[in-house]
Amino acid sequence: MAYNFNAPREAAACIDWIKDWFERESGAADGIIIGMSGGADSTVTAKLCCEAVGSTRVLGVLMPDGEQHDIADAVRACELSGIKYKIINIKDISSKFAEIYDFSEQARINIPPRIRLSVLYALGQSINYRAAGTGNLSERYVGYFTKWGIGEACDFNPVADFTKSELIKIGEYLGLASELVHKIPADGLSGKSDEENMGISYAVLDKYIRTGDWDEQDEQIISRIIKLHAAAQHKIKPVPFYAAGG
């Protein structure tokens, strides 16, 4: 099944959606706050928000966990979008947190994203800014994100229904720096790229999400995608709750 993505149309519609959400549903917020990593997701999100509400009402927050080798990319992403930014190093907090219990390796990896979310919300609440999510459809589909971590837990997410491939096309259309838009996606936690961690290429994943089709040589990858999607339902679906009197 063919699938044609119209980046100009989707970008314009998304900007209108952000503008409408901000005016109608943000609770009279003064601006938008975004956790900036320097990758395609946060870079595109910041640009879309700037187009919707103006760069003076968007704040980027950079939260390295100690030394971050590519923090210059996050700084550049903010500067190119014309937004102010703050750098808050969370190393002391994450180190202390990790000392309180003998956490599993995966739990330790997920500590920084959850701390970043707390910092983002504390800062956002202090200045009456709403937190924009930066997680994309590809990662959410297979559960490749930290539950209740930065990027996914948010007040609104303008890019949640775009695949990674589509976000790159939007970034290209918006004229963003190619080295940021096409930067190899990595979590900055494990030392591996996203594709290495997932065992899946974005090209195959995105094609499957949008068309349900795959090439014969990708059979094993598709099987993995289906299993990951099934296992990620507790992360993807809204929090279930008992309906009293039901």
Image: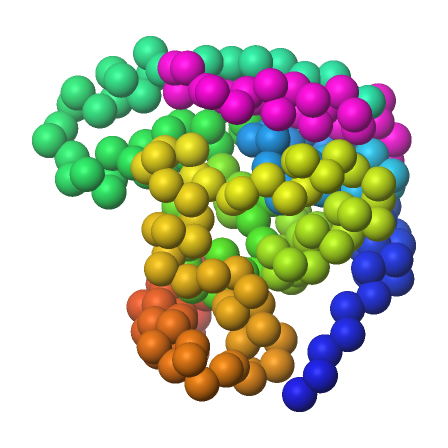
Q: Position of residue 27 (x, y in %)?
A: 74, 39
Looking at this rendering, what residue extends furthest in the left direction?
A: 102
Residue drawn at 37 percent across, 41 percent down: 192
Q: Nearer the viewer, residue 64 or 219?
A: 219
Residue 126 shown left or right of residue 140 in the figure: right
Residue drawn at 35 percent across, 51 percent down: 197
Q: Nearer the viewer, residue 19 or 188?
A: 188
Residue 20 shown left or right of residue 222 in the figure: right
Residue drawn at 79 percent across, 25 percent down: 80
Q: Is residue 74 above or below residue 211?
A: above
Displayed quadrant of residue 224: bottom left
Displayed quadrant of residue 99: top left
Q: Position of residue 227 (x, y in %)?
A: 33, 74
Q: Nearer the viewer, residue 164 or 109?
A: 164
Q: Is residue 233 above or below residue 55?
A: below
Q: Position of residue 11 (x, y in %)?
A: 83, 54
Q: Which residues are magenta?
A: 53-81
The answer to if 67 sits in the magenta stretch is yes
Looking at this rendering, what residue extends furthest in the front direction?
A: 217
The answer, for residue 217, to whether it is visible in the render is yes
Displayed quadrant of residue 222: bottom left
Q: Is residue 89 above or below residue 120?
A: above
Quadrant where the C terminus is found in the figure: bottom left
Quadrant where the N terminus is found in the figure: bottom right
The answer, for residue 127, to whether it is visible in the render is no
Residue drawn at 42 percent across, 44 percent down: 193
The answer to if 46 sits in the magenta stretch is no
Q: In this figure, what is the number of numbered marks?
A: 0
Q: Position of residue 171 (x, y in %)?
A: 76, 46
